[in-house]
Image (cartoon, grey):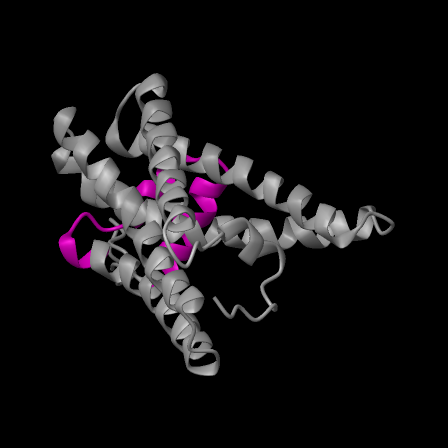
Amino acid sequence: MTSGRNPTPQGGVADIVRGMILLGRGSQAGLSFFGNTTESFLNALAPNMAWQIVGSVLLVAQAPTSWNATKLLVSLCVILVPPVVSHAFARRWSRDGRWLRYATASLWCGWLSLFVLVMALMVVAMVTSRVPSGHVVLLGAAVAVLYDAWLRWFIAQRGLGISGWRALALVVTTMIAVLALYGVAKLLPPHFDELRDFMVPATPHGH
């Protein structure tokens, strides 16, 4: 008799969580728990988009300023930049057939990076209780950014089947693209500053 479970995971909720945990601790086996279809990719993209849209729309409704509207647009673009950049690289390296599973895993594991950020802030805050809160946020964010960079590098290398140097080039290019987006948003009116918004999220912006 069979257990009724598909021996090859295809992206159910339990599979996604297990895949995230495995990848998060550096196990390539986690990739098999994500689907390699357009539907799997869109299912991974949807909660990321919804999270930003719902939060930003509520913010815009509370304070309908150009700053908050720009924050929504920038946030959505930041979500789309990694898939766009990685797809271009995957096509260049003839890894098209592996891109959907890689992109799906990468999107889901973004939530793992968010969890690490929260945990890092909590740990840093407890250990360094006398450090100004702004420094605690920066230190916790630095830990989370480093972990996120490693995780994205690992998933790119194993998911696309590329060398460590190519995976590094992909991660660095994606970071540069995101920073360039933030740079353009800061340069153009209403001069949205992501770092300022992150450090003082509760401050109303009347730009």
Front residue of this view, candidates 66 and 6: 66
Residue 151 seen from this side:
yes
Residue 125 pos. (x, y %): 76, 52
Residue 178 relative to residue 207: left or right: left
Residue ranking furthest to the bottom: 62
Residue 120 relative to residue 191: left or right: right
Residue ranking furthest to the right: 130
Please name the predominant secondary structure of the magenta segment in the image. helix
Residue 99 relative to residue 163: left or right: left
Residue 126 pos. (x, y %): 80, 52
Q: Residue at the spot x=46%, y=35% of the render?
A: 149
Q: Quadrant of the N terminus?
A: bottom left
Is residue 18 one of those drawn in magenta? yes
Q: Residue at the spot x=45%, y=37% of the render?
A: 151
Q: Residue at the spot x=39%, y=68% of the render?
A: 66
Residue 86 pos. (x, y %): 25, 36
Q: Which residues are magenta?
A: 13-40
The image quadrant that residue 64 belongs to is: bottom left
